[in-house]
Amino acid sequence: MSAIIEVKNLRKSYGSSVAVDGISFEVRAGECFGLLGPNGAGKTTTIRMIYGFTPRDSGTLQIFGTECDSAWRSIKSKIGVCQQEDNLDPDLSVRENLETFAAYFNIPSNMLSDRVTSLLQFTALETREGANVKELSGGLKRRLVLARALLNEPQLLILDEPTSGLDPQSRHQLWSRLEDLKQRGLTTLLTTHYMDEAQRLCDRLIIMDQSRILVEGTPLDLINSYVGKSVIEIVAPCADLHVMLKENEISFEDLGQRLIVYCNDGETLYRELLNDHCHDGCMLRPATLEDVFLRLTGRELRE
């Protein structure tokens, strides 16, 4: 499978602060590739370098097999970007926002109306095409930003936290649209703070922290490698439980009033803990990408 994006030793600093510290990865044609990490890890800076908003300090960046510095105009014409910020024009209607933005891509007038109509239908906005943007909910605005990012029929779609701040219904609606695009073979680069979103949408991903890449792989491989198949959460653990887990070399995290136990044979261990060690609460659940994320990047709050 050919690479749509090739990043090698990419670096970016702001004064003495290193934002991206020599990272390398590639995004293959037709896949959804995720960039995850805590606030300040370097995700958004990386994304902005890839779509040409932020200049890099060093390293190489190739998109569609072309070195970016020599062909930004051509490359940008084949990229769609869905940014975090709401940068729609508040003085225009839904349809007018799309038609105005289309001018950047010289879309012929005889094609524009049909393309806008098709995108409004795809994002379920056809009944709101005459509404002013200021009348739209957050979820509708995010769907309009997605429609706008698809106007030029891009070969690469870049999504920077596309569902941030949305209610669960709006998130799931947007996920459905993104899954449709994935089925069509569109290559997607995604940053998100929602681990369930990344686990559902991403074929492969990297987790960044402190400007560097910690791990790379498929969601399932990362879960199996760093957590296991199951997680047992224990409330108010007794002292002898720590001893038992250490003696049996069972991986766990001690959070004070709660223990997080990682294992593969969850059912057997769960029954043993429930019978002999858990007095106030014990829950067995499947391991998730969020468990991997927290285990690798820690649980402390970030600025």
Image (cartoon, rainbow, N blue to C red):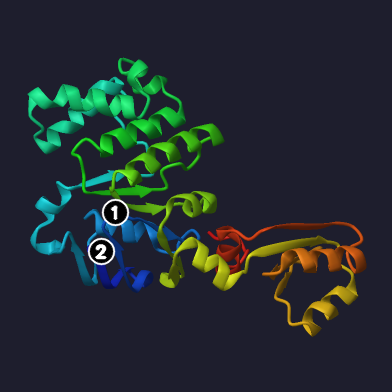
Locate residue 202 relative to residue 239 in the image: left or right. left
Residue 101, percent from left and from top: 20, 32
Residue 259, percent from left and from top: 77, 66
Q: Amino acid at mark 1?
A: Gly
Furthest residue in direction bottom, as rendered: 247
Q: Amino acid at mark 2?
A: Met
- SS of the residue at dot 1? loop
Q: Which residue is mark 2?
A: 1
Q: Earlier in the sequence, mark 2 or mark 1?
A: 2
Q: CA distance from mark 2 to mark 1?
A: 9 Å
- SS of the residue at dot 2? loop
Residue 118, above or below 10: above
Query: Is residue 97 something one can see in this rendering?
Result: no
| Mark 2: few/some/many CA within 10 Å (<14, 14-19, 20+) | few
Locate residue 272 relative to residue 160 in the image: left or right. right
Residue at screen point 22% across, 26% down: 116
Residue at screen point 33% across, 42% down: 181
Tell me where residue 91 sits by quadrant: top left
Q: How many marks?
A: 2
| Mark 1: few/some/many CA within 10 Å (<14, 14-19, 20+) | many
Contact (CB < 8 A) between labels 2 and 1?
yes
Which one is nearer the viewer's eye here, 171 or 266? 266
Residue at screen point 30% across, 33% down: 147
Which one is nearer the viewer's eye here, 32 or 23? 32
Q: Which residue is mark 1?
A: 30
Residue 232, percent from left and from top: 74, 63
Residue 161, above or below 119: below
Q: Quadrant of the N terminus?
A: bottom left
Query: Is residue 241 something one can see in this rendering?
Result: yes
